[in-house]
C-alpha cells in the first residue's frame, strides 16, 4: 500500500477527490455556473493545488496510490497555520462574493493537527484506504510532535461517523460550519 506526500503533478486526480467532499460547499468556492461536471469546475482547485502555501496546496496533502493511480487523498495541516493558509482563499472568496469582510469559519483549534478533507474514489471504497490515510496523518502529526488531531464531519455522513468511532476518536461536540450541521471529532495520542 503506497501513501506518499502529494506532488504538484497529482493535481488532476487530487482536485476531483477533494471536490467530492466540497460538493456541498461548492457554491462557496466556484461560481454556480461551474458546479456541473465539467473541467472548468475543477480548474480553480487544480490551480490552488499546484501552488504553495495555501489550504489546498499539494504541500498539505498525502495521497494513496494504487498501481500508479491516485485513488485517495487526505488534506492536513496544523491549526496554528490555518490563518496563513486561508489568507489567499479568503481574498479570492471576498472578490467572488463582492464582500470585503468575508472570512472562512475557523475549522481547527490552534493546538490541533487538522484533517480538512479525506476522500477515496468510490470505486476503491471499502478497502481500508481511508483508514490507512488517517493513520498516515496521525503518524505525520506524531512526527511533528503534535498530540491532538481533529476532523469535522457532516451530520449526515454516517459512514464517516462509524469510521472515526471505530478508530477511537471521540465526539467532542456538534456545531454548524458554512450552514451545514457537523460533528466535531477530537482525538489525543502520545508521541510514542
Image (cartoon, helix red, strand yellow):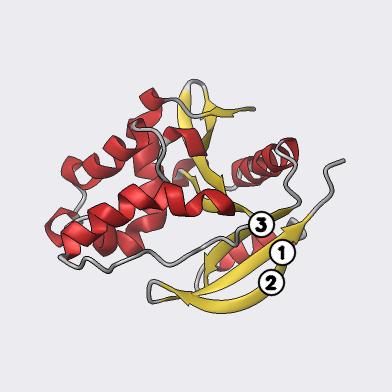
Which residue position holds label 1? 165
Asked whether 7 or 89 is in front, the reply is: 89
Which residue position holds label 3? 111
Residue 176: tell me if it is visible.
yes
Identify which residue is drawn at 66% across, 58% down.
163
**Of the image marks 1 and 2, the number of the one nearer the N terminus:** 1
Identify which residue is drawn at 38% across, 71% down.
178
Identify which residue is drawn at 40% across, 42% down.
54
Identify the image quadrant of residue 14.
Answer: top left
Q: Position of residue 75 (x, y in %)?
A: 51, 44
Task: From the image, state whether disc 1 or disc 2 is nearer to you.
Answer: 2
Among all residues in the image, which is located at the extreme right? Answer: 192
> What is the spatial separation of the Cα atoms under label 1 and label 3, in whole angstroms?
22 Å
In what element is the residue under mark 3? loop
Circles 1, 2 touching at the beta carbon (< 8 Å): yes
Residue 96 is left or right of residue 22, and the answer is left
Which residue position holds label 2? 171
Label 3 Cα crowd, 10 Å radius (few <14 / some 14-19 / many 20+): some
Residue 184 is left or right of residue 87, and the answer is right
Q: Position of residue 155 (x, y in %)?
A: 52, 74
**Of the image marks 1 and 3, the number of the one nearer the N terminus:** 3
Quarter that holds the C terminus: top right
Q: Establish if 25 lies above or below 46.
A: below
Identify which residue is drawn at 52% across, 73% down.
182
Q: Establish if 185 lies above or below 60.
A: below
> What is the spatial separation of the Cα atoms under label 2 and label 3, in whole angstroms?
17 Å
Residue 125: tell me if it is visible.
no
Label 2 Cα crowd, 10 Å radius (few <14 / some 14-19 / many 20+): some
Amino acid at each position: 500500500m503506497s501513501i506518499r506526500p502529494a506532488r504538484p503533478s497529482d493535481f488532476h486526480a487530487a482536485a476531483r477527490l477533494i471536490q467530492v467532499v466540497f460538493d456541498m460547499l461548492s457554491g462557496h468556492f466556484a461560481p454556480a455556473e461551474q458546479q456541473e461536471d465539467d473541467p472548468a469546475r475543477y480548474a480553480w482547485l487544480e490551480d490552488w493545488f499546484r501552488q504553495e502555501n495555501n489550504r489546498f496546496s499539494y504541500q498539505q496533502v498525502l495521497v494513496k496510490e494504487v498501481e500508479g493511480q491516485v485513488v485517495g487523498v487526505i488534506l492536513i495541516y496544523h491549526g496554528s497555520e490555518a490563518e496563513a493558509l486561508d489568507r489567499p482563499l479568503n481574498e479570492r472568496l471576498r472578490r467572488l462574493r463582492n464582500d470585503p469582510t468575508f472570512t472562512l469559519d475557523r475549522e481547527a483549534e490552534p493546538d490541533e493537527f487538522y484533517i480538512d478533507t479525506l476522500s477515496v474514489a468510490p470505486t476503491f471504497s471499502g478497502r481500508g484506504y481511508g483508514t490507512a490515510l488517517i493513520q498516515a496523518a496521525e503518524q505525520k502529526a506524531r512526527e511533528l510532535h503534535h498530540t491532538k488531531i481533529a476532523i469535522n464531519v457532516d451530520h449526515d455522513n454516517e459512514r464517516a461517523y462509524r469510521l472515526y468511532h471505530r478508530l477511537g476518536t471521540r465526539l467532542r461536540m456538534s456545531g454548524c460550519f458554512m450552514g451545514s450541521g457537523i460533528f466535531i471529532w477530537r482525538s489525543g495520542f502520545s508521541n510514542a
